Amino acid sequence: MKILSTTTGIIVGICLFFVLLFTAVQVVAYNASYYKWQYKRHEVMEATKMSLDDLVVVTDHMIDYLKGRRESLDMQATIAGQVREVFDQQDKEHMVDVQDLFVKGTYIRNICFILMVLLLGVLFYRHKKLFLNTLFMVKYVFACIIMLILILSALLLIDFNKYFTIFHEIFFNNDLWLLDPDTSILINMVPEVFFFQTAMIILGIFVMSVTIILVLIEVFKKRSVNYPSLRSFVK
């Protein structure tokens, strides 16, 4: 029983990790208001020579592209007083890779969610003691994950550029992500400081979500112990 509950707990914990992580990424990355706030904060209008209104329109299209709702990033806007194509060829080719990551991330998140719900559903209806033990095991899985997240956060704070580069070298098999600020609108829209702050916010949302779930599991554990009808299901 202990080995089985450990195994199911690890499976559920890993599935929940991907569900929460990719959801946190999408909460931020698909939020046009967040980009607008960042544009104002870092004077992106000056760097891109675009108006805030045009940046917002371009951002809406870019978000739709990341979601897979647009086939391309072909669009025009007024830049430095002239109507021209917003993104150059390298911008577009790099965003093809970025879109692929987002689409695959969504797919992985959805598969993990379905697997987690099915596993917990079967355990709840067929073996409630194992169901409860699995939930309690998730606490230990996420305790380890939070420790890793804290270490990652510390590393990002110490040298973000180093680990930002490592991330790209792992997930991209080309150098298209090395954009030129003198010619690329994309890198001027979302400079490195944008990614640093976004990473910190995503990690914050993730940790907050994990904390809420751990509290709910602990509350459920205490209630199950206090109720005679559930007491026999707990270790």
Image (spheres, helix red, strand yellow):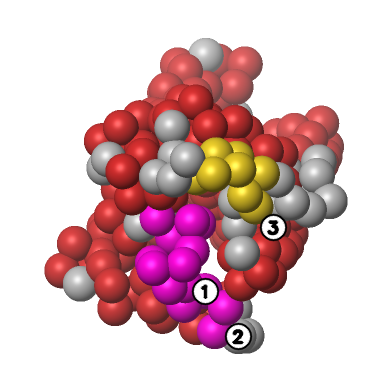
Q: In this orientation, does residue 66 appear?
A: no
Tell me the crowding category of disc 1: few under 14, some 14 to 19, or many 20 or more residues within 10 angstroms, Cα based: some
Q: Quadrant of residue 162?
A: bottom left
Residue 36, quarter of picture: top left
Cα separation, mark 2 vs mark 1, equals 8 Å
* Label 2 crowd (10 A; few <14 / some 14-19 / many >=20): few
Q: CA distance from mark 2 to mark 3?
A: 15 Å
Residue linked to disc 2: 174
> Which three-letter amino acid code belongs to the residue tagged 1?
Trp
Q: Magenta span covers which residues?
A: 175-188
**Tags 2 and 3 in contact by the CB under 8 Å rule?**
no
State the image coordinates of residue 14 (x, y, percent, origin top left). 59, 57
For disc 1, the marked residue is 177
- Residue under the image location 43 percent in, 73 percent down: 180
Crowdedness near tag 3: few (<14), some (14–19) or many (≥20) residues, C-alpha within 10 Å: some
Quarter containing the N terminus: bottom right
- The residue carrying mark 3 is 99
Q: Is residue 112 magenta?
A: no
Question: Which is nearer the N-term, disc 2 or disc 3?
Answer: 3
Identified by mark 3, the residue type is Gln
Secondary structure that dominates the magenta span: loop
Q: Secondary structure at mark 1?
A: loop
CA separation in Å, label 3 and label 1: 13 Å
The residue shown at (67%, 63%) is: 92
Task: Report the front residue among 170 and 14.
Answer: 170
Q: Nearer the viewer, residue 130 or 91?
A: 91
In the displayed structure, does residue 158 sit left or right of residue 35? left
Callout 2: helix, strand or loop? Answer: loop
Residue at position x 28%, y 72% in the image? 161
Badges 2 and 1: C-beta atoms under 8 Å apart? yes
Q: Secondary structure at mark 3?
A: helix
